[in-house]
Amino acid sequence: MKTVKLLVSFLAVFAMAYLITADPAAAAFIGGAATWSISQNYIPLPTGILGSYVGAAGEGKISVISSERDRATYEHNKTDPMYAGREMTQSYLRLESTIVQGKNILTFKAFEGDGTTVYPTEKRLDRNDAFIIDKIAVMLVKQDVANLKTNGELSTYPNQTIFGATAAADLFSIYMGDLRISIGRSKKLVALDLLRFLTIPQTQKSASTNYDQKDYKAGFVNLTPQIRLDGSGTNELEIQFPAFVGWAGHSATSGTEHRVVLYLRGLLVTGGSMNM
């Protein structure tokens, strides 16, 4: 379609130029120059990477054409003047909140040392850094806290073998809730439905000797637009879900906890905090 439009444009400009100049060569030159100018509005300049378009003209950032989302995200953000001279690498954050009976709002602390409890399995953001969220997963884990173990299996759904039949049935209500993120006074996510994160594999864990069928992508959802967490600001992340009388998604096993894990993948900008 773009080729047809450009051809029609060339012929129209050529005809007009020929009527004025009566010179075919001059008319062809004028038509070619005009068509080239018009083409810039139809086709973004190539960067040597083919695929989907990321970025927009006038942003002050690079416009990237890439078939690989991670590369496009990196190329798009590394040219932001805000990050000039800062190291940018792929990384992750793992934030956890314990499920407590009678509590249907779970908050997640984003910074290192924030709050009285930091679980050894968490990975939080340094106050000097920034983090660009590209992918999110909302997972569940049953953790042995009595022995300070860190080998709890992350689940993308409430598995009965792991959490027990009663707790697993009620844990499904978490995925009927939503995720909310506010950065400073700006609401970045007002209510992102959690159902999109519920991933039940075809083969499921049914004993202590086997595991769910899954890979490193299981349960992760691309976040568009991306959200930037900054060590200098106030980042509020919480999950709200419907509860009911007798809700029992918490752990009934002594020495263990059921937790919701907010797993974020994206770009870590070392020293990228606004206060640096």
Image (tube, rainbow, N blue to C red):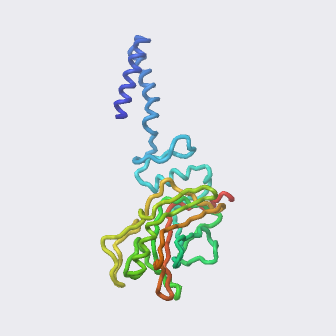
The count of marks equals: 0
Asked where in the image residue 106 lies, by quadrant, the reply is bottom right
Residue at the far left: name it.
202
Residue at the far front: name it.
245
Q: Is residue 128 left or right of residue 63?
A: right
What residue is drawn where x is 39% and y is 24%? 10
Q: Position of residue 133 (x, y in %)?
A: 52, 60
33 versus 70 height, above or below: above
22, 1: nearer the viewer? 1
Asked where in the image residue 127 lies, by quadrant, the reply is bottom right
Residue at the far right: name it.
275
97 versus 230 height, above or below: below
What residue is drawn where x is 38% and y is 15%? 24
Q: Position of residue 148 (x, y in %)?
A: 53, 85
What residue is drawn where x is 44% and y is 66%? 176
174, 13: nearer the viewer? 174
Quarter of the figure with the N terminus = top left
39 versus 57 height, above or below: above
Q: Position of residue 173 (x, y in %)?
A: 44, 71
265, 64: nearer the viewer? 265
100 versus 221 height, above or below: below
Q: Position of residue 268 (x, y in %)?
A: 56, 62
What residue is drawn where x is 63% and y is 61%? 271
